[in-house]
Image (cartoon, rainbow, N blue to C red):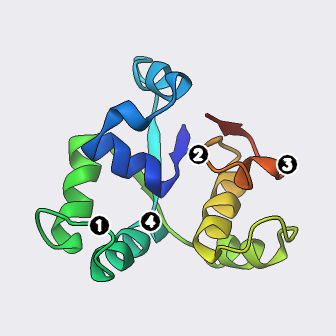
Amino acid sequence: MILLDTCVLLWLAHDTSCLSETARRKMDVPNEQWAISAISAFEVGQKSLSKKLTLPMTVERWFPAMIRQHNLVELPVTVEIAARATLLPDLHRDPIDRVLIATAMTHDIPLISPDEAIRQYPDLQTLW
């Protein structure tokens, strides 16, 4: 299983040319499971609300549709993940990214992300 950064989900939905060659190759692997954190729904909703992103429907409908369309596994934000996010080294200040990092670490899965700051965490498996 591989966890998608929110931007990777958006590129998967709208413009796969933004994905790295590694990401595109991984997406072609048969039976590879892709996961998305529930926190990404919040991030997508915030981007839509602030007009940084235009969705063809409400986020309440768009996000579940993306999960179904791309056969994604939804990972909840648990107390363990939320607490772990607060204990991470101060390499990245974005709280949503910190939750994504903690999610990947808690589930012991790689996080696919173009964000160089995310990829600096020593105990985090990343792909890009």
Q: Mark 4 touching mark 3, by CB under 8 A?
A: no
Q: Mark 4 touching mark 2, by CB under 8 A?
A: no
Q: CA distance from mark 1 to mark 3?
A: 32 Å
Q: Mark 1 touching mark 3, by CB under 8 A?
A: no
Few, some or many residues within 10 Å of mark 2 (<14, 14–19, 20+): many
Q: CA distance from mark 1 to mark 2?
A: 19 Å
Q: Secondary structure at mark 3?
A: loop
Residue that sits furthest to the left in the current view? 57
Instruction: Indicate which disc residue 53 carries.
Output: 1
Q: CA distance from mark 4 to mark 1?
A: 13 Å
Camera-side residue of 35 and 113 = 113
Identify the residue position indicated by label 4 in the image: 40
- Please identify, in this view, whether the residue under mark 4 or under mark 2 is nearer the observer: 2
Q: Which residue type carries mark 1?
A: Leu
Task: Name the image quarter holding the C terminus.
Answer: top right
Q: Secondary structure at mark 2?
A: loop
- Please identify, in this view, whether the residue under mark 2 or under mark 3 is nearer the observer: 2
Residue at 36% across / 73% down in the picture? 47
Identify the residue position indicated by label 2 in the image: 113
Q: Secondary structure at mark 1?
A: loop
Q: Secondary structure at mark 4?
A: helix
Q: Quadrant of residue 71?
A: top left
Q: CA distance from mark 2 to mark 3?
A: 15 Å
Q: Which residue type carries mark 3?
A: Asp
Q: Which residue type carries mark 4?
A: Ser
Coordinates of residue 59 in the picture (x, y in percent): 23, 71
- Please identify, in this view, whether the residue under mark 1 or under mark 3 is nearer the observer: 1
Whether residue 56 is visible, yes or no, is yes
Instruction: Indicate which disc residue 119 carries.
Output: none
- Please identify, in this view, whether the residue under mark 4 or under mark 1 is nearer the observer: 1
Identify the residue position indicated by label 3 in the image: 123
